[in-house]
Amino acid sequence: MEYLTLISYIPYLIIALTTISSIMGFNNRELSDRLIFNVGAILGPSKQWYRLITSAFIHGDWMHLIFNMMTLYFFSNDIYELGVWKYLIIYFASILGGGTLSLLMHRSQYYYSALGASGGVVGILFAAIALNPNMGISFIFIPVAIPGWIFGIAYIAYSIYGMKNNIGNIGHDAHMGGAVIGLLLVILFNPEILAANGLYIGIMTIPIIILGVFVWKETRR
């Protein structure tokens, strides 16, 4: 009982810390610049690798922060059963996965910067979809809930398209890196879901394979 009580507070703690640090970053440009993901700072002489994690604790504006934290809150419920450490591993490994893919895609653009917890949030989202692919995902402007596995396919496809065409001021590569890590880790931690949800997971894997081919081609340029 105490164990379940402990994990129930983990998302709240992450949300609280992220909100506090983001608000501080709103009012302190120097702090934000010190924590933000920046290719030059990470790959340059100073090797500030810590930015892969600290960038997840700051956001560009209130809308960015609220959207990420609400998504994390709503989908964390589905990961509770895995345990405290597995939840934390999925979240922070997804952040690292998103940052790593961003580094790979923008390695020659030392000016490139990004911020936000989207990699970790999307990792939790896709882990939840793998556990329950038929969960309904609703949007304010769409009156009917979309099955999670369909949303997953559409999300990955759009992110690949966004990466390829540089659409919007959005870190599509960080989202994709987080999605892939979240999906892989939940399968590693709970392999029996392959027997129950293998078809849905397999379908979602198809666009991920396409992503892999795209990244491979980009890194060979």
Image (cartoon, rainbow, N blue to C red):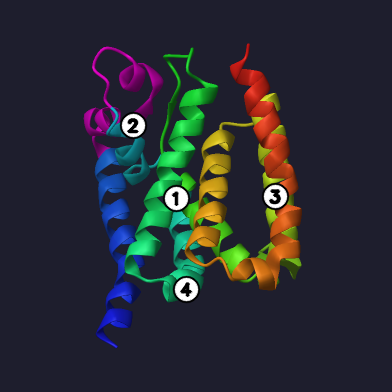
Which is more foreground, mark 2 or mark 3?
A: 3
Which is more foreground, mark 4 or mark 3?
A: 3
Residue highlighted by disc 2: 36
Residue highlighted by disc 1: 120
Q: Closer to the camera, 200 or 64?
A: 200
Q: Closer to the camera, 143 or 173?
A: 173
Q: CA distance from mark 2 to mark 3?
A: 31 Å
**Mark 4 or 3, nearer chain start:** 4
Which is more foreground, mark 3 or mark 1?
A: 3
Q: Which stretch did the figure color magenta? A: 27-48
Mark 2, secondary structure of its residue: loop
Residue at 46 percent across and 40 percent down: it is: 97
Left or right? Give the position of 85 relative to 99: left
Residue highlighted by disc 4: 77
> In the image, what residue type sits under mark 2?
Ile
Q: CA distance from mark 4 to mark 2?
A: 29 Å
Mark 4, secondary structure of its residue: helix
> In the image, what residue type sits under mark 4?
Asn
Magenta run includes residue 28: yes
Residue highlighted by disc 3: 205
Mark 3, secondary structure of its residue: helix
- Report whether residue 75 is seen: yes
Residue at 64 percent across and 30 percent down: it is: 163
